[in-house]
Structures are given as C-alpha cells and as structure tokens.
Amino acid sequence: MSGDVQPQDSNQQAGHGDGHEDGHGHSPYQAHHFDTMRQQFEAGKLGMWLFLATEVLLFGGLFCFYTIYKANDPELFKWGHHFLDKRWGATNTMVLLFSSLTMALAVREAQLGRKNRIIFFLVVTFLCGAGFMGIKYVEYSKKFEEGLFPGKYFAYENVVDAEEARMHEQEQQKLAHTELDLPQAKVVTELPKAQGLVLQPATPPMGLAAPPKEPDDHGGGASSSVTDAGHAPGLALDPSHLPPGPRPANAHVFFSIYFCLTGLHGIHVLIGMGMMVWLMVLASQGRFGPGYFTPVDLGGLYWHLVDLIWIYLFPLLYLVE
C-alpha cells in the first residue's frame, strides 16, 4: 500500500545513479526549505492528512444533515429510495473498490520506479473513474426525465403515485357507465315504434345493445380501455417504477439531499481523474523512482478517501429500510 517505502535522504542517494541527484548530493525535487527528501516527504504527507481531515468534516456535516432529516421523516426516505437503482449503485461500488486496488498498485510501482507499470495502473484507475461518472450520468438522466429535481425545481409529473392513479380510475369508470347507459335506453324505447316490433324489456335485440359490463377486480369491462390508454393524457403510470403509498408532501427534500451528496462526491471523482492525468504526464517523464514518489503516494490517499465516502453513501441512499 501507499507509503510503505520511505524516500532516501539526499545524502544517502549520492552515487546510486538513479538520476535524482544534482551532483552535490541533493535531489532536484527537493525544495530548498527542507533539509532532506525524507523530511519533505513526511511534511507533504502530513499536509495531505490535514486536507483529508477537512474533507471528512465536510462530508461528516452532510451526513449529520441526512441523519436529522431521516430521523424526523423516515417514511420520506423509504419512499424516495425506490427511485434509486440498487444495481447501478452496487456496480459503482465495485468499480471504485477496484480502482482503489489499481491506485495502490500504481503507488507501489512508483516506489520501484517502473514507469510503464505506473502509467498502466494510473490509466486503469482513470478509466474506473470515468465508468463511475458514466453510470451517474445514466442515473441523473432518468431522474431529470421524471422531473425529480432538487428543491424548488421538483416537478414530479411523469409518474403518478398510487393514490392519484386509483382516484383517476374511479372517475373514468363513472364516466364510462354514464356513456353506456344512455344509448341502451334509446334502443329499447324508440326502436319498437319505428319498426312495429314487440320486444321483451329484459331481452334487447342481438347486436343492437348490450348491458354494461361491471368491471371486475382485474380491471376488466369499461375501465380496461381507460387503463390500457394510460389513464389520461399527462398521467403516465409506470407500475414497475412506482413506490408504494402516496407521494409525501416534501418529496423534494429527499432528492435535494441525494443530489447534494452524490453531486459533491462526483466533483471529487472528477478532481481525482484530473489528478490521474497529471500523474501520468509526470510518470511518462520518468520523474518517479525509489527516491521520489510523493505525488503518486499523496494522490493515492486522496483517491482512497473518495472511495471510502462512496462506501458510506451507497447504503445510506440506496439501501434505506
């Protein structure tokens, strides 16, 4: 893992012929305000740990925000998590876990000075980050199509909740019964006068009129045409994607939290991908070896934190119970 090989002091590097000395026992990568490369490495690592501590505080505050809202309204989170695809979330989790492995291997290869292998593992890590963001794009696109925006932009119109669908179906059944009763009355009363026929009131002529069929429990009869037509213009029901129960009045709060947490994490993934490109450029220049691998080591720490944060986000948002 990262940091298990310490860079040698500048006075210990002289004469090794690794290309990191300037002829006076000092590495060209050593800053003037450090006495040795070891001191520079340890100072850089301490600075990175302090930075990661601020990141933990940032996401820790958001996790507290999530916990308070969930404790006050647990049903809201049970309703909202039905819109999140567990399969995509689990796939992203596996992708980031694998990327942490490849990043650790890149750090190890940097410590050994194997340029080609450093670049290879950095490229794989970059591709894992790109795959993660690609999956988030698919998830976000589906939310936007359904009007599941955060805050005041929430417009949940393309999918109706179960209560709205039930009430609308009842109204359509009443209208269908009314429309079928009127033609039947005209056929029974007016047709005998026109043709001189004597008809039994309970036996209408074949093919002229039929008694209205009562809807059964399976949506048959008059209501079946309404159901097959999609209930009504503007109300598209997707039963496979519909959460149980009526829509909460504050449904927008869940998606505000969802986009805040996953969006901020996604920004960190993009920053990490940019860091990978920078490290690949340095590695291609032969900058890393046993005497100097600090950028790769610190970059690995940052990427591991990005992975760790998602491990918490996945169960909190996707596996709500």
Image (tube, rainbow, N blue to C red):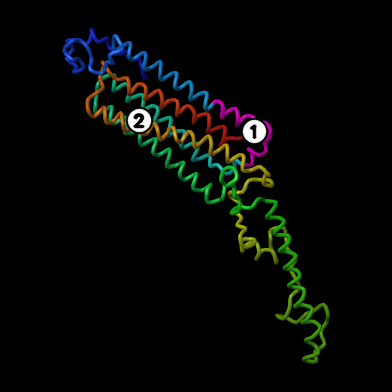
Q: Which amino acid type corresponds to the residue marked 2 in the rendered image?
A: Met
**Would you say residue 78 sits in the magenta stretch?**
yes
- Check the image and report above or below for 208 versus 245: below
- 143 and 114: which one is in front? 143
Residue of label 1: 70
Q: Which residues are magenta?
A: 60-79
Occupied quadrant, residue 76? top right
Q: Is residue 202 left or right of residue 11?
A: right
Residue at image position (55%, 25%) is 60
Residue 293's quadrant in the figure?
Answer: top left
Question: Where residue 169 sits in the image (x, y, percent)?
Answer: 70, 59
Q: Position of residue 250 (x, y in %)?
A: 66, 42
Local secondary structure at mark 2: helix
Among the 4 quarters of the image, the one containing residue 184:
bottom right
Is 174 magenta? The answer is no
Q: Nearer the viewer, mark 1 or mark 2?
A: 2
Q: Which residue sits at x=39%, y=30%?
A: 99
- For residue 28, which numbered disc appears in the image? none
Q: Is residue 210 or residue 158 the one in the foreground? A: 158
